[in-house]
Each structure stands twice: as structure tokens, then as C-alpha cells.
Image (cartoon, rainbow, N blue to C red):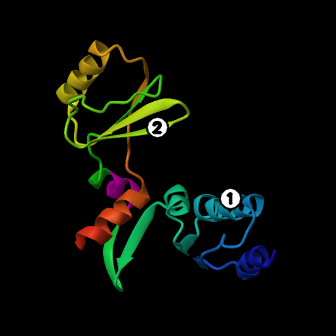
Amino acid sequence: MQQKVAVAAALIADPPILLLDEPTIGLDVEAARTVKDWIVRLAREQGKTVVLTTHQLDMAQELCDRVAIMRAGCVAADMPVQDLLRRFRQDRYRIALGTWTDLTGVPLPEGLTTSHEDGATILTASNLDSPGLYSLMSQLNQLGLPLRSVSPVEPDLEDAFLELVRAGTTDG
């Protein structure tokens, strides 16, 4: 409740720029959603500039048009969210097989990882172009493995953040 009151108090003066530091920390799910809705309304409907500092990258991706990522006190990236995500897009696919399958000994493409969830085997292929994907699908078909789904894996803000921090590069 204190967090919601703090945001409401900041809005009383009707400032053109609103600085919010971790506005949903300590809030329950419903209250956090209310605060997020306020932020969206302020920025999109009332035309206010909202500067949001957060470690909750999923929230930043959901709410922000532009993001600045800091590393060691310096700006590592400062650009529209979609441009940043596009920068880290790869040919990655998630392939779900219909059953739990042991693929030990099966020659699979380099960079392919396997996991299991909900009784299915999940293959995640990184840097796999279309011909490589078709080849893998043919190989799985020849093994008689049931296919549940194939979907592209898009990067999220957390992926971009980790890449920027690990690489030690600056982009802006």
C-alpha cells in the first residue's frame, strides 16, 4: 500500500516527467498490475515522460519504449527496446517432441540442447538456419519421433542484458 501511495503522491503535482525507482517492489500481483497500468496510462494517454529504474527486465520490456542498460556505471546500450532485441535475434528454434525421448548417441547439430518438461523432450537449436532446421526435422522424422511443436525463440530483454554485460561491449 505504501508503494501505491508513493506513486499516487508523486502524481498529485502533475509533473511532466515522473521518475520511478522499482515501483512494483514489494507489491502483490494485483497491486503491481495496477501500478503498471498507471505507468502505461501516464506515458501513452497523458503524454508524460516516465523514467523507470528496475532490475525487473520483463517489466521493462513490457512497459518501456526505450531502454538504457548500465554496466559498471556506464551506459552499455541506449536504444528502443525493439531495436535492442532485434540486435540479439538469432536463428533459434524450440522443438517439442511428443514424448520423453533419450537422444543419447543420436548425431545432433552442434549447439543443440535438450531438456525435458511435461513428459516431452525439448530441443533448443541455436544459430540454425532454415536448411539446418529442415535437416534436423527430417532426422527426427526418420527416427519416428512424434512432433508436438516447432517455434522460433525470440530474445527477451534479459537475454540482451546478459549478452551486453558478458561481452563487455558498449552500444548506443
Q: Residue at x 59, y 58 (%)?
A: 44
Q: Check disc 1 and give the amino acid type.
A: Asp
Indicate the quadrant containing the N terminus: top left, top right, bottom left or bottom right: bottom right
Residue 56 appears left or right of 80: right
Q: Which mark is residue 76?
A: none
Q: Position of residue 37 (x, y in %)?
A: 68, 58
Label 2: which secondary element: strand
Vertical relation: 105 (above or below) 39: above
Label 1: which secondary element: helix
Residue closer to the observer: 32 or 42: 32
Residue closer to the observer: 115 or 169: 115
Residue 115 seen from this side? yes
Q: Are marks 2 and 1 in contact (CB under 8 Å)?
A: no
Q: Residue at x 30, y 33 (%)?
A: 104
Q: Residues within 10 Å of mark 2 (few under 14, many from 20)?
A: some
Q: Residues within 10 Å of mark 1 (few under 14, many from 20)?
A: few
Q: Check disc 2 and give the amino acid type.
A: His
Q: Residue under label 2, please give it.
A: 116
Total number of numbered labels? 2
Vertical relation: 74 (above or below) 95: below
Going from the N terminus, do you reach mark 2 or mark 1 first?
Answer: 1
Q: Residue under label 1, please give it.
A: 37
Q: Check residue 149 for magenta coloring.
A: no
Residue closer to the observer: 47 or 37: 37
Residue 82 appears left or right of 49: left
Residue closer to the observer: 125 or 160: 125
Where are the magenta residues, as a range?
A: 79-85
Q: Position of residue 22 (x, y in %)?
A: 60, 75
Q: Residue at x 27, y 54 (%)?
A: 87
